[in-house]
Amino acid sequence: MTMQHSEPFSFTIVITGAPYSSQAPQTAIGFARAALASGHRIDRIFLYGDGVHLASALSSPPSDEPHWPREWSQLLEAHDIPGIACIASALRRGLVDEAEKKRYELSAHNVRAPFVIAGLGEWVEAGLRSSRVIYFHGGSGA
Amino acid sequence: MSTLVVIDSAPYGDWTGREALDMAFSLAAFDQPVTLLFLGAGVNWLRKGQAPEGISQKSVEKNLSAAPIFGVEGLLADGRDCEAYGLAEADLIAGVTRVDVGSDLLHQYTHTVFAG
């Protein structure tokens, strides 16, 4: 069934649950695909907290399981949607891009394209620009 | 745009509350109106005299005391939850307003946010 709206929405999707420990990334991708199929726009994906693990270039699930980081990367590239991982959440959890690798003199970087890391200002802007900001949480909170 | 950032889990047990606090400070840094609401076990964030050094954590009490300086408009606590956790006025850090949480309160904000 297709939703009917006089004007399409613009969505920011915030994911705070990690792949393989929460359902958040796959529920969010289902939502994103449905929204795009219904003619809505997705302004950006913002990964926060444990959600930053979705941007790992090193995730290697067994071949008979869905590869959520790859699925998400492909969706972002196909629709030219910016994917942003919060820098503070990412660095704490070992998600590092090339610039931060150099800054902290680390041995490797592991952010999967097209994801980039940036500050919470991107999330603040999302609240101002997008018509809806939708959160997908891991639900592991006490 | 005005945002209510909700913290509903106790401090020190997980990281979601700290990340919610970062969201609130970030909104304030960009001059966006933001208020923090503590619910359920989250009201324990507001307890005076926290001493988490023994578990190698920094006290969240200092961060919260600095919230008004950084432009966070209010620190709200669910009055019933304070009572449930034995938090009287004198047990709370300065600047906390106890409120009845319901649709009247939530409707005052354009966005309501949980960190996780």
Image (spheres, coloured by chain):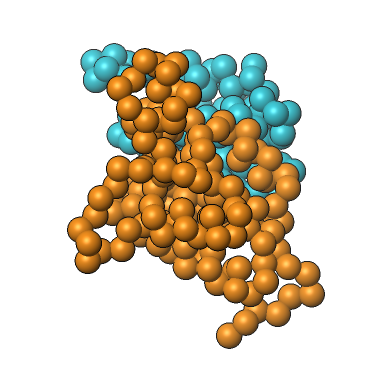
- Rendered colour, chain B: cyan
Is A57 displayed left or right of B114 in the figure?
A: left
Image location of residue A100, percent across then percent down: 45, 23
Which chain did the image draw in orange?
A
Residue nearest the observer in this picture, A140 or A40: A40
Image location of residue A96, percent across then percent down: 40, 30
Residue at the image position 54 percent from the left and 64 percent from the top = A32
Residue at the image position 59 percent from the left and 47 percent from the top = A82
Residue nearest the observer in this picture, A46 or B39: A46
Q: On screen, B72 above or below B100?
A: above
Residue nearest the observer in this picture, B23 or A57: A57
Res. A112 image quadrant: top left
Q: On screen, B93 above or below A43?
A: above
Q: On screen, B27 above or below A129?
A: above
Res. B27 image quadrant: top right
Q: On screen, A5 above or below A137?
A: below
